[in-house]
Image: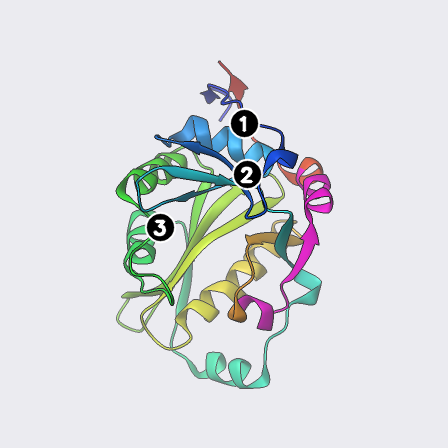
Amino acid sequence: MENVSFRKIKFPPLEEANEDGILAVSREINTDFLFSAYAEGIFPWPSEEEYVLWFAPPDRTVLDFHNLKISERTKRYLKKADFKFQVNMNFRDVIKACSESPRKFQSGTWITKKLMSAYIDFNRLGFAWSFETLNSKNELVGGLYGVLAGKYFSGESMFCREDNASKFALINTVNYLKEHGLTWMDVQAETPLLKRFGAANISREEFTARLKRDLSFTLKER
């Protein structure tokens, strides 16, 4: 990792984001953009026009691991489920599955080919990771991917092909991250599922303070 370098992309100050959290717009996305954005607490979201919107919302949803809530029903189901968990073995398949996963209130996918290519390159550099659920036939049936740098992890997207496979991936991801010294994860925006697991909103200021404390890219600017 010592040889990794990047070209710094200058984003506006976070306080200039509009009320929807949109801070900037770009035509392209690559690892230079990803390095620069995550270092500042900014994340991408492509629009229907193929522009990439860069977000820094006033409130950020995070999951503090000590607040993780797992219902008794979920515990019983997962105890009986014939699932296997693995880390970073099928990143390309996971992000592709996330791009194909239907979303409520969305006709398309926000994970465009351009965005997939950037995150696959980020994975090759060691900063984008996948967490995967396999069934008894060793088929990929659930999982999530995100950005891992130092003691910071940002979950980007999840998918599920069998009941509770994404929950299995999320719970085991939390356990994996805890074992490696992390105490929380950035989930960006609140969803009903994440709220049930204990995710909550914090201010942009608190999030930025956590980011400065925990995020670490081993790279140099070129």
The residue tagged 3 is 110
Mark 3 or mark 2: name the one nearer the start of the chain: 2
The residue carrying mark 2 is: 42
Q: Quadrant of residue 39?
A: top right
Residue 97 part of the magenta-drawn span: no
Q: Nearer the viewer, residue 42 or 65?
A: 42
141 left or right, relative to 71: left
**Residue 179 in sight in this render:** no
The reply to whether the C-beta atoms of the residues labelled 1 and 2 are less than 8 Å apart is yes
Instruction: Give the vertical position of 84 relative to 50 (above or below).
Output: below
Q: Which residues are magenta?
A: 194-211
Provide the secondary structure element on which disc 3 rests. Answer: loop
Q: Residues within 10 Å of mark 1 (few under 14, many from 20)?
A: some
Q: Please tell me in which quadrant of the rendered image residue 117 appears.
A: top left
Kindly identify the residue that appears in the image at 35 percent across and 37 percent down. Answer: 51
- Between residue 152 and residue 48, name the one nearer to us: 48
Q: Position of residue 153 (x, y in %)?
A: 56, 47
